[in-house]
Structure formats: C-alpha cells, structure tokens
Image (tube, rainbow, N blue to C red):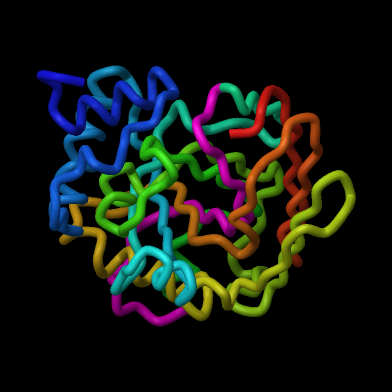
Amino acid sequence: MPGLSLAHCLDQARHDRVPLARTNFPAGFTVAQGYTLQAELAALGQSAGRMAIGRKIGLTSKAAMAAFGAAEPMAGTITSDSLREAGSQIELDELISPRLEGEFLIEIGHVPLADSDDAALIASLVSVRAAFEIADSRVAGWPSTAAQAIADNACCGLVIPGSERISPGKVDFSGAKGVLRRDGVIVSEGCAADCLGGILHAYRWLLARGPALGLSPRAGDIVICGAMCGPLPMHPGCRYDFAVEGLGTVTIETAGQAG
C-alpha cells in the first residue's frame, strides 16, 4: 500500500479483510516499536469511532510466549465495535483468520495498586464472566514474533462475554476448570491456573506493566485475561460452548467460511 504508514496499512487490512505480508515489518522490529505502532492503530480506530472499553492480556502461558519468542505477556485494547452478545451468530467472512479462545472476563470497579494482595484485587472487581475471544490477525499467516502481534493490537478480534455476571468473591481464580465444546464434543480443556498461574496474577501483571505500555486499565474497563482453552481454528455452521466452573456457559454459532 504505497504512501501509507504501517498503522494505516494494518487498519486498511482490517477494513478490507486482506492480510498484510510480514515483510511489511522492518527487520529487527522490536516490542517497543510494536506498542508504538499499536498506539497509532488505536488512534486511527478512535478517530473512526472505535472507542476503547477494556484491555486484553495475551501470551499468558509459557507455551504461548515461546511460540512468539516473548519474554512476558502482551497487552492490547478491546474496542466498542468488537463486542458481541452471547448466543450471537458470528460471520466468519467478516474476519481474516479467526482462532477461538475461552477466557475469564473481569470488570474493574476501581483500579487497585499493582502490589495489592489478592483480597484487594478481588475487591476492585465488579463482576467476573466466562467469555469467548475470537483472536484474529491482520498479518498474513499470523505474526511470527511478539512485536508483530503487539502491533496488531495483540491480535484482538471479537469478544463475546457470557450473560451471567458472577460476584468476584464467589470465584476460584486459580482452580476453576473450563471446557470448550464444538457441537457438543469437547475440543479443548483448561484451568484458570494456565493463565500466569491464576487470573489474579494476570490482572496484577496488567496493573504493573500497563502504565509503561500506554495501556493502563481504568475503572469500568473489561479485561480478558488469557486463554484457558484454545486457540482453535473456527469452522462455519458450528455451535461452540465454553463452560467454566462457577461462571456458567457462553455460546456462539458460526456462519460463512473458515478464516
């Protein structure tokens, strides 16, 4: 896309649903450059009315970090246009290369200190829900490095929160197990501890690192805390259910073509 900045190219790729070749990223592209580019991309989205409503935490397992050559998790922004209701039909044609993940979604009432104990972190939350994230990438073949993924808004595509809002005091943030089913058949299983050893550890990481990354969490934000189940390629004409102990079940159906 001659004449356009890399941020504009990524934004155009999202609009056209045509991925950008990895070769558009300069050699030696760094994590710091990734966050700078992500901020430019967010500014373009905001000017188009895509407002920030929360944060995504990604690469919360050792395997995920290793796959992208990352030294720590990554963060991105959830925008207003990315939300879908539980039970929605998801048109895969509207995405590029979707991958499904089952996650914890927390809602922040007030922002605590990063070094707060677990009780204070729990007290800072309004509610907890099971949620789907449909991760997606504007980079052809998906990013090969953490820096590329970060630049692509941490590959945040769509977020589908469950309809059941659970009181934080009733939630097992480290031991809760999750099961993801496609058409009634189990396709992935996981545990809250798979996310940095527990959801509160992931939340604490965001509180500690978010300000330096330009991604401070805010009161009223929703936060998805890393994949308990998945990521999985998605297929059209399917029903997906993600059930988490103590949080209930969130469901979607798919149409269109696989990404």
Quarter residue 18 falls in: top left
Indicate left or right for 217 with 229 as reference. left
Residue 76 sits inside the magenta stretch: no
Task: Reply above or below: 72 against 254.
Answer: below
Q: Nearer the viewer, residue 256 or 77?
A: 256
Task: Reply above or below: 204 against 85.
Answer: below
Residue 51 position in % (x across, y down): 34, 29
Q: Residue at x 76, y 33 (%)?
A: 253
Can you name the residue that lies furthest to the left here? 3
Residue 102 sits inside the magenta stretch: yes
Rendered-image quadrant of the N terminus: top left
Q: Residue at x 33, y 50 (%)?
A: 149
Q: Does residue 220 appear in this view?
A: no
Indicate left or right for 224 with 146 as reference. right
Quarter residue 153 falls in: top left
Residue 218 position in % (x across, y down): 32, 50
Residue 25 position in % (x across, y down): 20, 43
Residue 242 position in % (x across, y down): 74, 53
Rendered-image quadrant of the C terminus: top right
| Residues rendered magenta in the picture | 94-118
**In the rendered picture of this protein, how many numbered marks are placed on residues?**
0
Q: Residue at x 76, y 62 (%)?
A: 179
Task: Reply above or below: 119 against 73.
Answer: below
Can you name the residue that lies furthest to the right here? 184
Q: Nearer the viewer, residue 81 or 94?
A: 94
Q: Does residue 226 appear in this view?
A: yes
